[in-house]
Image: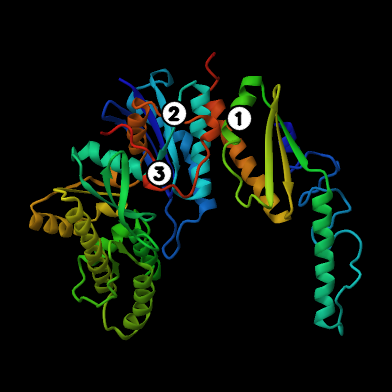
Amino acid sequence: MRHADADAGGGADGGAGQGGHSCPGGADTAAAPAGGAPPPHAPGPGRDVASAQEGLRHRQSRIRWHLNRMTPSTLSVPFPTTLEAEIAHGSLAPDAEPHQRVVGKDLTVSGRILAIRWKAEDCRLLRISVINFLDHLSLVVRTMQRFGPPVSR
Amino acid sequence: MPAVLGFEGSANKIGVGVVRDGKVLANPRRTYVTPPGTGFLPGDTARHHRAVILDLLQEALTESGLTSQDIDCIAYTKGPGMGAPLVSVAVVARTVAQLWNKPLVGVNHCIGHIEMGRLITGANSPTVLYVSGGNTQVIAYSEHRYRIFGETIDIAVGNCLDRFARVLKISNDPSPGYNIEQMAKRGKKLVELPYTVKGMDVSFSGILSFIEDVAHRMLATGECTPEDLCFSLQETVFAMLVEITERAMAHCGSQEALIVGGVGCNVRLQEMMATMCQERGARLFATDERFCVDNGAMIAQAGWEMFQAGHRTPLSDSGVTQRYRTDEVEVTWRD
């Protein structure tokens, strides 16, 4: 659970490494227009609405491009035993993600580690998915603490 | 003598129940109540459920006097219902099933209501009126399916009542429907509302729009009181429900009617249904608030029937679903 605690946004071990709080994908991704390089068509006083909108669309398409191209981010959750990691997997994997075309996650177990990989095209939905996952993970862990340990097979 | 543990949390009630051979050994429940004028949202409801579910599970075990070893099967609501609350409860059910190495059974919420209604009342093969905040269906059993004879084509009757309660800022404690029922008893004037039976089906969204509009106008002019509106709404929607139930009973030649679901607690609805049944020489069955309103034991009971008939839900198939038709389930436990 150290990994989960370390990163508020949940993007712990991403291919890009730095995984910021709002969007994984590293420092060069402007999650909000305020980050990264200054936008080329910043609206200012006297600029007309049409070119301001064009500038916004340009920034948004750059963001989408970065998200689609970046390596999916991964959260690794260690458990005390292999069996408990498998139980967590069994509890958390079956439910389908809402907005399946835009956000998806894959759960795998290897040894004592439960690994979750997210792929997303939208920052906000990714954030919601991660937060919901962490809430349910916490519930599973509390259940195991209170009603475990698992009976021997 | 199998004992089944059942988890329910598809709307704002969360319950954990224990049933063994037709006896309810425990049935604790909590309700997420929001301030007057508001309804319950999925995320907040799920958060409430996550906060109380483990305490409820412990209560259920203690009250039943059983340990995890004594439980033979874990049942939970697979659907229908609200997404986030369903997931929050399913996750716990799957975890304890794996911790204790017990089989898992995913139950249809509507069938949970029906099976508990049958168990508690002893009704043989009734025409069922299932009315709640989320569902409004007339159901009859035939050849291994609970078939839907009539239903709402838009919103549930309970949803209509609950949303009307918000307009009048009626308290949601213990439930908006209960408070509307108490106010309706003091109503004196019948305000004419649209009456929308569509053959075997009903529609409530038009009535809701109409009465929301009427409420603002007539309360401002003092033409009627909030009690009159509560009374008028109940009389209208309940008469519609009685009509479609009667139509189904006539089609099936049925001599029994059973009311299940939270709106089934309403005494006025029970009175009106009783009058109709008496005119037809039929018997009316209804349960009390413990079993009408969503509860864990009803899921345990349906789960018990399914478990005995050999149903098992593998983990990979155990995902919840917001849409789950009553007639999708093969009712192998009845002839």
Q: Which of A140/B148 is in front?
A: B148
Q: Nearer the viewer, residue B77 or B266?
A: B77
> Could you tell whether B284 is left or right of A148 in the image?
left
Mark 3 belongs to which amino acid?
A: Glu
- Chain ID of residue with mark 2: B
Q: Quadrant of residue B73?
A: top left
**Which residue corresponds to the image point at 39% horizontal and 65% vertical from the top-left?**
B163
Pointer 1 residue? A88
Measured Cα–Cα span from mark 3 to mark 1: 29 Å
Quarter of the rendering containing residue A124? bottom right
- Give the mark nearest the N terminus, 2 or 3: 2
Asked whether residue A9 appears in the rendered view, the answer is no
Which residue in the structure is indicated by mark 2? B312
Cβ atoms under marks 2 and 3 closer than 8 Å: no
Residue type highlighted by circle 1: Ala
Q: Chain of mark 1?
A: A
Crowding near pointer 2: few (<14 within 10 Å), some, many (20+)? Answer: some
Quickly name the residue at label 3. B328
Establish if A7 lies above or below A51. Answer: above
**SS for callout 3:** helix
